[in-house]
Amino acid sequence: MADPFGFLEYPKKENPLREIKERIYDWHELQIPLSEEERRKQAARCMVCGIPFCHTGSFFGGQRAVSGCPNDNLIPEWNDLVFQGRYKEAFERLAKTNPLPEMTGRVCPAPCEDGCTEALNGQGVTIHDNERFIIDTAFENNWVKASGTPQRQTDFKIAVVGSGPAGLSAAWRLNQLGHHVTVFEREDRFGGLLMYGIPSMKLDKAIVQRRVDLMEELGVTFIANTEVSSDVMAKQLQKDFDRVILTTGAGVPRDLSIPGRQLTGIRFAVDYLTEVTKDVLKYGKKTTSRKLEGKHVVVIGGGDTGNDCIGSAIRQGAASVKQLEITAEPPVYRSKKNPWPGYPITRHLGYGQEEAYAIYKEELTAYQTTITAFVGAQRGQLIAVETMKVDEAFQPVEGTKEILEADLVLLAMGFLGTEKHLLDLFDVNEIYDDYTTDNEHVMVAGDARRGPSLVIWGIREGRLAAEQVNDSLLALSYH
């Protein structure tokens, strides 16, 4: 611990966001990184405490919320190294567990900071921003390429189906271990939700492409526009490769089957965000398309995806944006039933919500509210939604019906799980905790295995699945 008084001397200071009146007219990244001097001060706030809750992911409330980092990141060690200015060593510590820190350093909600010991009586260390500083510095100095170069080469070939966080993490680690890796992706670009599910102002797509380009340079093969859609292809993959890892995510969105669902103007959030990103990639980040000029948008669901929909709709010129949440409004501060180090169930305004309040000057979110019907015009176009308040059991309350104008409804209610037909193609009926399945040639990792979760969970699962594959293949070679 280089500065035992750092947490007393320096207040928490996160990377500031660009001014709302400026950022809503382009798709450039939101954050403005602090100076190197200020970053070292923030790293000095880490106490290198004897019980570092920050890097031990613990579940609270069943499997609903995690406090601390589930990826076993050596956070106190690299915080201390950043304070000392030993940035290469900090990167080496970070890269031991996280193959994609440039992603988590931008989009992770940082449960590690909520689990930080300093968060018991104050604000946790800026772990998220420190991580971004480390990896950005590493790319500037070409340390990332050196860390990914295989130290040896084997004859084993592994197919990774899906190129989201879990797929990229697995491919990076397998290549690092010396195996021949081929990544298959059904979209036209690689990165999964990193590319098409998270908008550019949160994660610049050049950052995702930089990692893919580096992996190709280091020997990973990427094949786009290829979907495993038949048992013939599934069998061919198992024939051509020693192992297949399925990392296709939890891509089945939760729907809302109510009257009027067939109307035009009702879309799943990820489909909308994918279209938004493709527009940005085509036309650039400097200007916005104004596609929603004069349109009234309703976002159903909270969380990061709902927030991203709000921010994207604002940049496309929406006349109004409303958000409906079926749950009750969370408290401003922790309740006695939600003590540290559990994940804080408190009200938090995301960047998109802050923008909406600043622009529209009216209440954005209606809590304990659900849609009971979609209302359309004669030609089948959505024009409004019928809403009702709900009780604690999420049942509609009589006498609370209202009509809300809507030209576009975005369903951001989460995901149900992976596409079962893909598992069927590979004859997978059971998926085990160690990423193996009842098909000895096939493994499953990431959201496809555990259900919808954070990017950092996908990274962890991809890395550990890769190491499991490595151990099993090396065991075969010894016999």
Image (tube, helix red, strand yellow):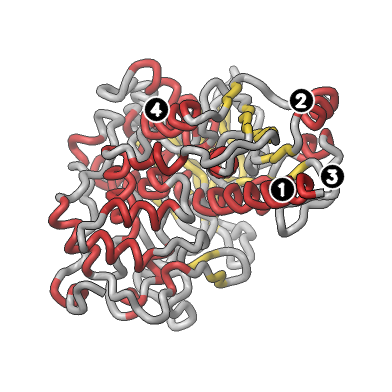
Spatial CA span between label 1 and label 4: 58 Å
> Measuring 57% from the left and 25% from the top, which residue is drawn there?
222
Q: Determine which of the numbered discs, if any, sits on residue 439 in the image.
A: 3
Q: Where is residue 295 shown, x and y percent of the image?
A: 39, 27
Query: Around disc 1, counting alpha carbons within 10 Å, would you say few (fewer than 14), some (14 to 19), or many (20 or more)?
Result: few
Give, as a three-letter code, the residue at label 3: Asn
Q: Choose the circle earlier in sequence order: 2 or 4.
A: 2
As rendered, which of 174 and 26 lies closer to the eye?
174
Q: Determine which of the numbered discs, if any, sits on residue 295 in the image.
A: 4
- Circle nearer the viewer, 1 or 4: 1
Give, as a three-letter code, the residue at label 1: Leu
Exactly how many numbered labels are in the figure?
4
Q: Is residue 331 left or right of residue 79?
A: right
Provide the residue designation for mark 1.
Answer: 474
> Measuring 37% from the left and 34% from the top, which residue is drawn there?
207
Kind of element beneath mark 4:
loop
Provide the residue designation for mark 2.
Answer: 229
Is residue 313 visible in the rendered image? The answer is: no
Give, as a three-letter code, the residue at label 2: Ser
As rendered, which of 163 and 151 lies closer to the eye?
151
Q: Choose the circle earlier in sequence order: 1 or 2.
A: 2
Spatial CA span between label 2 and label 3: 18 Å
Q: Choose the circle earlier in sequence order: 2 or 3.
A: 2
Kind of element beneath mark 2:
loop
Query: Around disc 4, counting alpha carbons within 10 Å, would you say few (fewer than 14), some (14 to 19), or many (20 or more)?
Result: some
